Image (cartoon, rainbow, N blue to C red):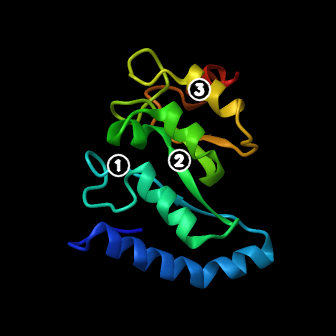
Amino acid sequence: SGNSEGRSSEEGLANCVAGLRRVTGAAEEKGITLCMELLNSRVNHPDYQCDRTAWGVALCRAVGSPRFKLLYDIYHMEIMEGDLIRNITDHIDCIGHFHTAGNPGRRDLDDQQEIYYPPIMQAIAATSYEGYVGHEYRPKGDAIDSLEHAFEVCNV
């Protein structure tokens, strides 16, 4: 979506819809799913436009292609709006991929961060979602040990 740079939310949405409709036909022909990542504009990406679930869902519905979805970054959406399980389950049809990370700091999924992942993963597993969950964070220590722990935390 890029930065809003003074554009209204509605204008930004219209621009994104127009641009994405130009490429979704090719994605449909090739069986490729395009994902727009939801990022936070409070801490990491000031002025980023696609920073709320509702905006991303409106974009997904307006584009109207089965090959356009959202990359729901749990870390970013915790910072922006919380209410993670409800937002995920209510809009699972618009989600094509997930990212995890601990908050604060986009670090390990350990006891030093505020997001409790097991019920979030259980809620995702209870939906129709059949895609992947990617771990996108900066490990504090050994990357393999950290990734193994993240897998254990999210394996439901």
- Indicate the amino acid at tag 3: Ala
> Which is more toward the observer, 83 or 50?
83
> Height in image: 110 above or below 61?
above
> Height in image: 126 above or below 39?
above
Q: Residue furthest bottom?
A: 22
Is mark 3 in CB contact (under 8 Å) with mark 1?
A: no
Instruction: Please give the residue where the numbered disc 1 appears in the rendered image.
Output: 40
Quadrant in the rendering for residue 10: bottom left
How many numbered markers are drawn?
Answer: 3
Q: Kindly state the secondary structure of the residue where label 2 is placed.
A: strand
Instruction: Please give the name of the residue rendered at 73% of the width and 68% of the height, measured from the top-left corner.
Output: 32
Using the numbered discs, state the Cα–Cα distance from disc 3 to disc 2 in whole angstroms: 17 Å
Q: How many other residues sit within 10 Å of disc 1, few (<14), some (14-19) or many (≥20)?
A: many
Quadrant, the C terminus: top right
**Closer to the eye: label 3 or 1:** 1
Answer with mark 3 or mark 1, whichever residue precedes in sequence: 1
Label ID, residue 105: none
Using the numbered discs, state the Cα–Cα distance from disc 3 to disc 1 in whole angstroms: 22 Å
Label ID, residue 72: 2
Instruction: Please give the name of the residue rendered at 34% of the width and 38% of the height, measured from the top-left corner.
Output: 79
Image location of residue 138, percent across then percent down: 45, 37
Q: How many other residues sit within 10 Å of disc 3, few (<14), some (14-19) or many (≥20)?
A: many
Viewer can see residue 135? no
Instruction: Please give the residue where the numbered disc 3 appears in the rendered image.
Output: 150
Image location of residue 34, percent across then percent down: 63, 66
Is mark 3 in CB contact (under 8 Å) with mark 2?
A: no
**Closer to the eye: label 3 or 2:** 2
Q: Kindly state the secondary structure of the residue where label 1 is placed.
A: loop
154 on left or right of 12:
right
Answer with mark 1 or mark 2, whichever residue precedes in sequence: 1
